[in-house]
């Protein structure tokens, strides 16, 4: 779709003075998946799977994450995402529950501020299975998105020329399922699968209905092994596929639990994340009482490494949980680590 848009512009008389830099900016955007992505997967769990709405300890969870990329190559690609989740209903022993969530995002890239804005409402339900150490969550989401660019940044030869459309508005649907298992006091796993853009909405600028946002498939798995009361190892893997684009992220965090009682809760974590064929990221996080503060830095390892001097992107994120319970007895609360 974006390549088609560039080709259309190049045929216009007023585009004679457009620079190669502008084309390069658009091509960079085409080279990545159509939807946004982050290296810190757990800071925006709803991006990977709407079924993770409600998988939190407490009455609510709010988060913001920001990403800045390619600042050394071109105009920075900037992405921001925010989530708000509330527990609507939860049984006394957490055997089942219903939650509602809102996920919004925006990204801008290149000289024309080309980007997207989207917002989705999510409803999820989870149910304990067996002896209560297994939880299954299902969710649906519906939202609206917009893609567009800023024509004011184009140097026009003929000032009377106009664009047919500068923005495209579209609806989107998604669904997901997730499974959580507390195998023992020291070991848990969670796995999720989701599909976004189920309706493959039309995002054509020319109103031709020939350009659609492809379905995006997501698979995510995270585990934790507590080899001592204070230290945990948390491997993670995430995979996304959208049309011909694939993204595989894998890595592991080490978490140090200094105090697990809510009033003085403190945990530190650090880890390495690899985006296959693209980047290596270092993640750092501090979890203090109901807050999580996280930072990530990507070193670019792709074919653009020479141009970017291996400088890729950085991310910062914050999460706040309302009514987080005491974690000193891990089974007493809904077990869903964030980092």
Image (tube, rainbow, N blue to C red):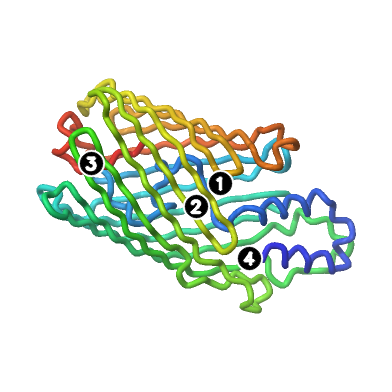
Can you give x and y, in whole percent of width and height, for residue 247 in the image? 54, 51
Q: Which residue is identified by label 2?
A: 105
The residue drawn where x is 63% and y is 65% is: 167
Whole-angstrom CA distance, mark 1 to mark 3, is: 30 Å
Establish if 175 lies above or below 153. below
Quick one: SS at disc 4?
strand
Mark found first going from the N terminus, 1 or 4: 1
Whether residue 78 sits left or right of residue 290 in the image: it is: right
Whether residue 194 sits left or right of residue 129 in the image: it is: right
Mark found first going from the N terminus, 4 or 2: 2
Whole-angstrom CA distance, mark 1 to mark 4, is: 18 Å
The residue drawn where x is 26% and y is 22% is: 230
User: Badge 2, how many Cα within 10 Å: few under 14, some, many 20+?
Assistant: many
* Dot in front, 1 or 3: 3
Residue 79 is marked as 1
Residue 335 is marked as 3
Q: In which quarter of the image is the C terminus?
A: top left
Q: Which residue is identified by label 4?
A: 167
């Amino acid at each position: 779709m974006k390549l088609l848009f560039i080709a259309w512009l190049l045929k216009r008389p007023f585009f004679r003075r457009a620079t190669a830099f502008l084309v390069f900016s658009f091509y960079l955007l085409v080279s990545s998946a159509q939807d946004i992505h982050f290296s810190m997967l757990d800071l925006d769990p709803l991006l990977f799977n709407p079924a993770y709405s409600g998988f939190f300890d407490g009455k609510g969870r709010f988060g913001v994450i920001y990403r800045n990329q390619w600042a050394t190559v071109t105009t920075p690609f900037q992405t921001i995402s925010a989530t708000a989740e509330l527990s609507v209903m939860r049984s006394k022993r957490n055997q089942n529950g219903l939650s509602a969530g809102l996920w919004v995002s925006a990204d801008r890239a290149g000289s024309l501020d080309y980007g997207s804005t989207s917002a989705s409402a999510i409803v999820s339900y989870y149910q304990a299975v067996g002896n209560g150490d297994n939880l299954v969550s299902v969710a649906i989401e519906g939202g609206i998105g917009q893609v567009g660019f800023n024509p004011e940044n184009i140097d026009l030869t003929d000032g009377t020329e106009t664009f047919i459309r500068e923005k495209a508005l579209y609806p989107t649907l998604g669904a997901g399922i997730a499974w959580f298992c507390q195998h023992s006091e020291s070991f848990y796993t969670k796995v999720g699968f989701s599909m976004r853009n189920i309706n493959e909405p039309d995002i054509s600028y020319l109103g031709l209905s020939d350009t659609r946002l492809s379905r995006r498939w997501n698979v995510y798995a995270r585990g934790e092994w507590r080899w001592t009361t204070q230290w945990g190892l948390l491997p993670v893997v995430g995979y996304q596929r959208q049309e011909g684009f694939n993204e595989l992220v894998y890595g592991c965090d080490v978490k140090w639990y200094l105090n697990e009682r809510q009033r003085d809760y403190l945990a530190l974590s650090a880890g390495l994340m690899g985006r296959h064929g693209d980047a290596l990221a270092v993640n750092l996080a501090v979890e203090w009482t109901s807050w999580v503060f996280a930072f990530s830095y990507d070193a670019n390892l792709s074919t653009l490494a020479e141009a970017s001097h291996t400088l890729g992107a950085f991310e910062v994120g914050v999460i706040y949980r309302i009514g987080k319970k005491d974690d000193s007895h891990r089974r007493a609360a809904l077990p869903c680590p964030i980092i």
